[in-house]
Image: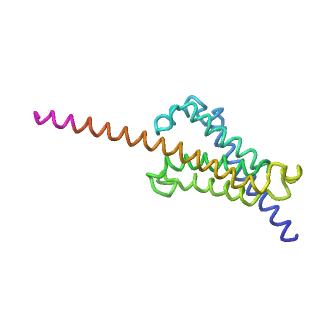
Amino acid sequence: MSAYDRRDLGLLLLRLGAGGVLAAHGAQKLFGWFGGHGIEGTGQFMESVGYTPGKASATAAGLAETGGGTLLALGLATPAAGAAAAGGMAGAAAVHAPNGFFNQEGGYEYAATLALAATGLAITGPGRLSVDHALGHVFDRGWMVPTALGATAAVTALVVGARNRRLDRAEKEEGAEGFEGQESLFGE
């Protein structure tokens, strides 16, 4: 087996593994499959962690993961697929970041690993054992990589930034209410 053949086989395995995990993770959100909570339950969770509106956020995350993961596994529209999946995982990593890095402590390790795998595939390309290759790479052009990753980074920064601002406002309001309650305890 030549090095080029090994590279294609390695990319296929990476695409199938990361893409399959992402697609299954998104199907939990969208359809409630594999023990997931579907749009309704995921929407409630999204609201609880600051992503509003919840159902729209659950739908966007589910589509990024299911669609991006499925396309990555197929090796189709690889730059856009990898960027979409990475964006979804960056949003998840933001939720887990306060818990540190490691997953056993509720950290962002898992989300970051999937995001990096998806980004790596978007940059590297799908290899010859892919639908993109079979179609002559019409959905996998060089200019598409920075465009897809740049657009996704900008949208992700806006969404996560808005979430963080909402959480900061809620924390300040909660702190002010608690402080006001303390004042009243002392008769001030």
Residue under the image location 14 percent in, 34 percent down:
185
Along the viewing direction, whichever of 6 and 87 lies nearer the viewer: 87
Residue under the image location 74 percent in, 49 percent down:
72
Along the viewing direction, whichever of 46 and 78 lies nearer the viewer: 78
Q: Position of residue 126 (x, y in %)?
A: 79, 56
User: In the image, is residue 39 above or below residue 8?
Assistant: above
Residue under the image location 85 percent in, 58 percent down:
128
Q: Is residue 100 magenta?
A: no
User: In the image, is residue 11 above or below residue 132?
Assistant: below
User: In the image, is residue 34 above or below residue 142?
Assistant: above
Q: Magenta stretch: dominant SS?
A: helix
Residue that extends furthest to the bottom in the rendered view of this protein: 2
What color scheme is it?
Answer: rainbow
Residue that extends furthest to the top in the rendered view of this protein: 40
Q: Quadrant of residue 184?
A: top left
Q: Quadrant of the N terminus?
A: bottom right
Tally of numbered discs: 0
Specify whether 168 is left or right of 117.
left
Q: Quadrant of the C terminus?
A: top left
Specify whether 108 is left or right of 77.
left
Q: Position of residue 24 (x, y in %)?
A: 68, 42
Q: Position of residue 27 (x, y in %)?
A: 67, 38
> Which stretch is magenta?
180-188
Residue under the image location 10 percent in, 33 percent down:
187
Specify whether 180 is left or right of 89.
left
